[in-house]
Image (cartoon, helix red, strand yellow):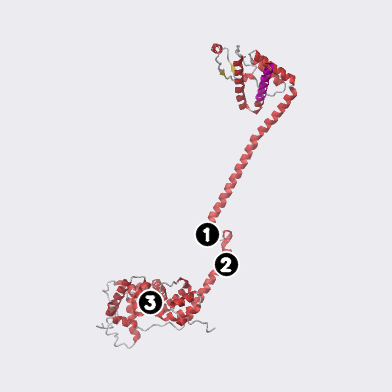
Amino acid sequence: MDSKKKDYKSLTDEQLIFEFQQEDVEAFNEIVFRYKDRLVNFLFRYTGNRDDSEDLAQDTFLKLYRSKHLYREIAKFSTWFYTIAINLAKTNLRKKGRYNAISISEFDPDGEKDFDLPAKGQISPDDSANASIENEFIQNAINSLNEKFREVIILRDIQDLEYEEIAQITDLPLGTVKSRINRGRERLKELLSDIYKPSN
Amino acid sequence: MIQEEKHLDIREKLLSLPKVKASENFESKLLSKINLEEAQANNNTSKPQTLENPNKGFFGNLFGQKNPFVIAGVSFAIVAIILIGIYFVNTSETDLTKIETTSIPETDVIEELKSAEDTKSEQLTDAEIMRESKEVASNDVGNVTTPGNRNQSSNEFMGRGYTDSYNYSDSPSIELSTPEAESDNQRGISPTVKPRERTDSRTALPPRISAMPNGNNRVHQEESVSSTKDSQMKRGNIREINVIEKNDLENLREKIINLDN
């Protein structure tokens, strides 16, 4: 029996979802094992809330469980899976009404108004030994980004996905994705300029 | 690539952010959610089976679904079929009553015809028929047919069992007494035939009849018989019997004339 047991760890994501489409629940368990941390991290950076990210990650896996037959091998499984996750995250943000509350830059589309970060004298990266506080500032800066910049920045610089894959997930042209990533980084740099001195 | 190098510090910062991991009970929570989802799916599939019949009602059980448009449409069709059925039943009943009302006189006429034929056959012997036919032939030979004679003969027929009070005075008569008619007759032009109103045989004045060629008289007699036939057809079936009998007599008369010749 053990000899017949499949080595799911050696299978690719596409092979796993194919096995799961054949009602192999072990393949689904392997997918959960592979993607749960990545998905929770992505959703946490996108929503800024730990509980929401956990719930959304579970909802994403649940949707995968229900809609496994909808996957077609025309794209990478990770692309399809992130698309599900980001759509659920957007829906959740709209439901909670946090979409406008968090995005400060939405009220300042031209970027003339800066994100209200703590003053230099109060909190400084040099003075702060707690990395969690630094991460919190970065997360706040990410959350302050406009949604169209935030999603591509997270997918590229946090999840480390390729431009083409991001273009497929966001359903945007490749040039638009690159442009948005560039503008999002510039905006983040401006927001974090009080914390990090630009490196030349 | 140039854009990435331009903001490489930001990218490194973002990549260096600590990775948030799923909680330890993430999989158990996910499993509970999946089980709950499957249980709800099972309930959704089992609930309609258990609660289907009580909620359906009469029409739901009848049509198998709760689509109100289907129920309304089928109901309308049933009502339409019932109305059409009632309409056809009523129309067929009225047709039957019409047939009954129209058939009654025909049967009566047939019975009357049979009874008349019986009485005729009983009362008219061959000798009498011959005598009657001779009288008609003598009238033809004399080229004169007087209404009085006809009235007499008809009265004789009436006295022998005919129930009709018809007499020949009802038929259009030939007026030959006018000078125009006489001159026309001398020139060989057929006289005009004018219909005369029905009068009682007792009060009707006898028409003035002059001599006329035998052929013309016969032609006009036939015309008068045909015109009386048409008028009698309008008066009813009983009078038609007399017309038929008189036609028979005419035929018989012609046969006798042929025999005499």
Disc assigned to residue B156: none
Q: Which residue is identified by label 3?
A: A47
Could you tell whether A176 is left or right of A58 in the image?
Answer: left
Q: Range of the magenta residues? A: B242-261
Amino acid type, callout 3: Thr
Q: Position of residue A196 (x, y in %)?
A: 28, 83
- Write down the quadrant of residue B144 in the picture: top right
Quadrant location of residue A179? bottom left
Label 1 amino acid?
A: Asn
Q: Nearer the viewer, residue A38 or A167?
A: A167
Q: Given the image, what chain letter belongs to the residue carrying mark 2?
A: B
Sequence-wise, which precedes: disc 2 or disc 1?
Answer: 2
Residue B67 is marked as 1
Label 2 crowd (10 A; few <14 / some 14-19 / many >=20): few
Instruction: Give the residue number, with chain letter if any, for mark 2.
Output: B49
Q: Is residue B152 above or below residue A133?
A: above
Mark-to-mark CA distance, 3 and 1 = 44 Å
